[in-house]
Image: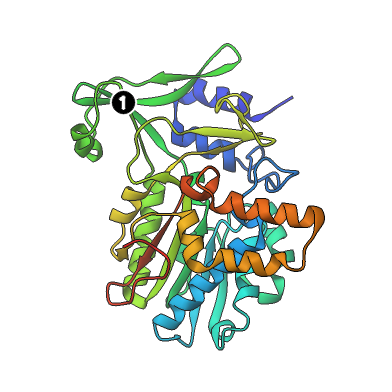
Amino acid sequence: MPDLKSELIAMIKAQGPLSIAAFFTECLLHPKFGYYTTRDPFGARGDFTTAPEISQMYGEMLGLFLAQTWRDQGSVAAFNLVELGPGRGTLMADILRATRAVAGFHSALQLHLIEASPTLQARQAKTLGTFKPRWHTQLDTLPQGPLFLVANEFFDALPIRQFIRDGQQWRERCVTFSGEDLIYALTEAAPHATLAYRLADTKQGDLVETCAPAQAIVQGIGHSITQHGGVALIVDYGNWRSLGDTLQSVQSHQSVAPLSHPGLADLSAHVDFEALAKACSAAYTQPTDQGIFLERLGITPRANQLAKSLQGSALTSHIAAHHRLTHHSEMGTLFKALGLFPTSAPPPPGLDL
């Protein structure tokens, strides 16, 4: 029976080994067998759970962040409210509910969703249809205007390349096959101009990751914010600078080998926040621990308020959700928030400068 693994092996036979980026893209977006094109992967019944699925409080805090930034920039009369990779639409629904009492905010916004998956577009339409969203597969089809954008666990799902240092050169990690199995291989060593700066902080055998699509997207975001105003909030797991193999695969909430279940498991990699920030022409904050960011926005008072109407297992789940979102042993430190904003505007709330 045809599956993605057999298609990938046929592709390798015809074209040679695949870069990690090419493998990554086929696994997630293959039109017939791609992970995101064939399923809804979110929540307890899916393969992973993101912050918006854990608690409404997360989206509420992000909604207040966007509304306050909109006010700080003069409450513009019309703007594009954009989410990259909206999943089920849960986060945006919580953002919109939290901001409905902010005078003028809803009447000024036009909702745009960047989503490549037809399956998820259909799910988003059910969740957000009353707000008449417009769908795009790329950022560059958005109308011009102030941009208020949120990207939650979006950049970790963009295809990366991996390079291993060999002397003063680099060998790219790629995917080939042996029998019926997909395996890793390395190219011959060669210089890479874009990695020249990494010779200063790496040693023989170190692996670094790059993500050209992420940098291109941030360049577009930065250009829009610089020209028209607004803010971008990027929340994801990662560090200031990439070092080491972070490619990971998850199926049914369990970690699996990245090459073992192509098209049937999620693939992701840690975000290099330095590469994003420095690709952007707008001003940027420092990556701020998610737990600190949410606490500064007021998640604990909100949690206490909601807890007053809860008891029993519902209260226990609520307390656990707050802990999971904010505690350093859970998502509080692993996940970072990065803000992009105009150089002429006040810094957005809650983030380190």
Q: Amino acid at mark 1?
A: Asp
Instruction: Establish if 255 lies above or below 182.
Output: below
Res 169 quadrant in image: top left
State the image coordinates of residue 211 (x, y, percent, origin top left). Answer: 39, 43
Q: Is residue 315 left or right of residue 274?
A: right
Q: Is residue 339 left or right of residue 87?
A: left
Q: Could you classify mark 1 by the number of other residues whose Cα lies within 10 Å: few (under 14), some (14-19), or many (20 or more)? A: some
Res 131 quadrant in image: bottom right
Q: Mark 1 falls on what kind of element?
A: loop
- Residue named by callout 1: 206
Q: Is residue 247 left or right of residue 305?
A: left
Q: In the rendered image, is residue 263 in sight?
A: no
Foreground of the two, 73 or 61:
61
The residue depicted at 57 percent of the width and 53 percent of the height is 325
The residue depicted at 60 percent of the width and 64 percent of the height is 59
State the image coordinates of residue 49 (x, y, percent, origin top left). Answer: 65, 47
Q: Is residue 162 left or right of residue 321?
A: left
